[in-house]
């Protein structure tokens, strides 16, 4: 998969050079902001839950998960079921570019630029960076804002609270939250914890940047 990603990155530079030049400046700013952040930094568990729920092959690809893409295509064509295939890199591109339209052109643009993200942000930092800029719901743009709105400190979050917080990336919490959305958030949180239990002994998180290693940066 990494060989394919490298080839895609060369094509991306050729096709989207102007867009990449603009995006790399934003990514660089976001990365430096992340390194300087000392308030409610995403916890290791939050990063692990993100990887388990959104991109469990995160450390084995270069921004594009071909297995997930092929599975999503098969389910869409054969079973008529929608399934996501976005990697964490692709989701970073989506948030930073501010492009959310559901078009093939946007998706190709997202896939191509995703292969270049680690040119500016080291891969082991990406889960934390995405959590810091992701949308969790109304007045919850980023992990710190989400903790603030929920009235909790990142260091004091329980496993269940952390899982429900990460679940809001899939099911953003609106200003007025109905019972159906609460059910989705709670069910997603339980699912993330089950995935985490299965993945924590399989080297899924082996290259993740741990909090203690920030001190030497």
Image: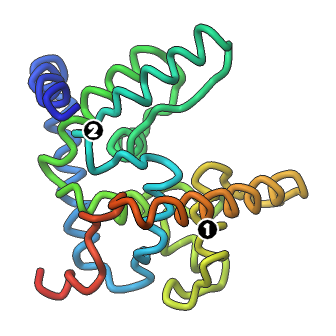
Looking at the figure, which quarter contains the N terminus? top left
3D distance between C-alphas at marks 2 and 1: 24 Å
Q: Residue at x 49, y 23 (%)?
A: 71
Above or below, comparing residue 43 to residue 114 in the picture:
below
Q: Residue furthest right?
A: 179
Q: Which residue is mark 2?
A: 63
Q: Label 2: state its secondary structure.
A: loop
Q: Which residue is mark 1?
A: 163
From the top left corner, tell me how far across and down residue 16 is, in percent: 19, 23
Percent position of residue 148, x then y: 58, 80
Which residue corresponds to the image point at 40% horizontal and 78% vertical from the top-left? 41
Number of residue marks: 2
SS under mark 1: helix
Task: Classify residue 153 as left or right of residue 109.
Answer: right
Which of the 4 image quarters holds residue 215?
A: bottom left
Q: Is residue 158 left or right of residue 56?
A: right
Q: Nearer the viewer, residue 200 or 210?
A: 200
């Amino acid at each position: 998969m990494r060989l394919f990603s490298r080839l895609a990155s060369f094509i991306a530079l050729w096709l989207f050079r102007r867009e990449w030049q603009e995006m790399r400046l934003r990514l660089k700013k976001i990365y430096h902001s992340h390194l300087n952040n000392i308030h409610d930094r995403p916890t290791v568990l939050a990063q692990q839950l993100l990887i388990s729920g959104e991109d469990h092959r995160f450390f084995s690809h270069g921004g594009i998960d071909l297995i997930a893409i092929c599975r999503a295509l098969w389910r869409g064509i054969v079973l008529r079921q929608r399934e996501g295939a976005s990697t964490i890199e692709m989701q970073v591109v989506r948030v930073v570019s501010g492009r959310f339209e559901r078009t093939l052109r946007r998706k190709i643009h997202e896939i191509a630029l995703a292969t270049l993200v680690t040119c500016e942000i080291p891969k082991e930092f990406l889960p934390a960076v995405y959590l810091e800029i992701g949308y969790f719901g109304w007045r919850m743009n980023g992990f710190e804002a989400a903790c603030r709105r929920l009235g909790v400190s990142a260091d004091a979050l329980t496993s269940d609270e952390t899982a429900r917080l990460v679940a809001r990336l899939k099911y953003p919490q609106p200003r007025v939250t109905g019972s159906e959305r609460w059910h989705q958030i709670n069910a997603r949180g339980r699912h993330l914890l089950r995935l985490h239990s299965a993945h924590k002994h399989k080297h899924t998180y082996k290259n993740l940047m741990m909090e203690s290693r920030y001190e030497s940066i």
